[in-house]
Amino acid sequence: MQRSPSFGFSDGFPEAEDWPIAPKQPPEIVFADRCRDGGPQGGTLQVGLSAPNGKVVYLFFDRFLGRLCLGWDEKDVNAAYIKKGSKLEFEAFGFLEAAVENARPYTKRSICMAGVEEALAEARVYSSLPLR
């Protein structure tokens, strides 16, 4: 992983180009929560995608720019920005968007699930993907 410039953090994050564990298909959000850690985005939004063997792949939207990252949060030793233009970026957005779209009705109504939709739209600004 390469180091990227710092965006609100003392020494920046590395950039990831591949999954640590690939999420299972069809993608399913098993965890979504917003931390009360401040920042212009209203706090870090953490999301967990189901992975094989009962594991979870954690992603988060950083609290400063809202950029999509791998890891639990900015303090995670394995935290990394998702590299712009990478296959991982394309897949991560696709998996999260599909998981939101295919979520059960009671899950879709949750505040955090609505937060995931909003965060995805905001994160597209910092990605190589077209805006919607």
Image (spheres, rainbow, N blue to C red):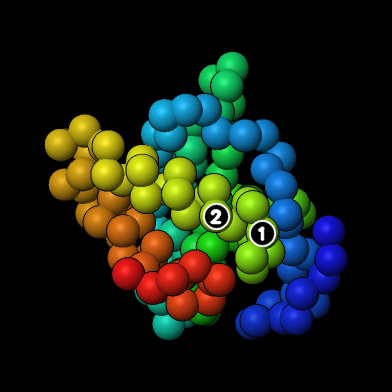
- Whether 103 is drawn above or below 37: the answer is above
Name the side, left or right, on which 17 lies relative to 73: right
Considering every residue shown, the one lying at the far front of the view is: 130
Numbered mark located on residue 60 in the image: none
The residue type indicated by label 1 comes to: Ser
Q: CA distance from mark 1 to mark 2?
A: 7 Å
- Residue at the spot 62% in from the left edge and 34% down from the top edge: 22
**Quarter of the image containing the C terminus?**
bottom left
Name the side, left or right, on which 6 lies relative to 102: right
Of residues 10 and 109, the one drawn nearer to the viewer in this rendering: 109
Numbered mark located on residue 90 in the image: 2
Q: Name which quarter of the figure residue 57 lies in.
A: top right
Answer yes or no: is residue 97 visible. Answer: yes
- Whether 125 is drawn above or below 18: the answer is below
Q: Are marks 1 and 2 in contact (CB under 8 Å)?
A: yes
Q: Name which quarter of the figure residue 108 lies in.
A: top left
Residue 48 in picture, x, y percent from top left: 48, 41
Considering every residue shown, the one lying at the far right of the view is: 2
Residue 128 in picture, x, y percent from top left: 56, 71
Residue 112 in picture, x, y percent from top left: 30, 53
Which residue carries the number 1 mark?
A: 86
Q: Residues within 10 Å of mark 2 (few under 14, many from 20)?
A: some
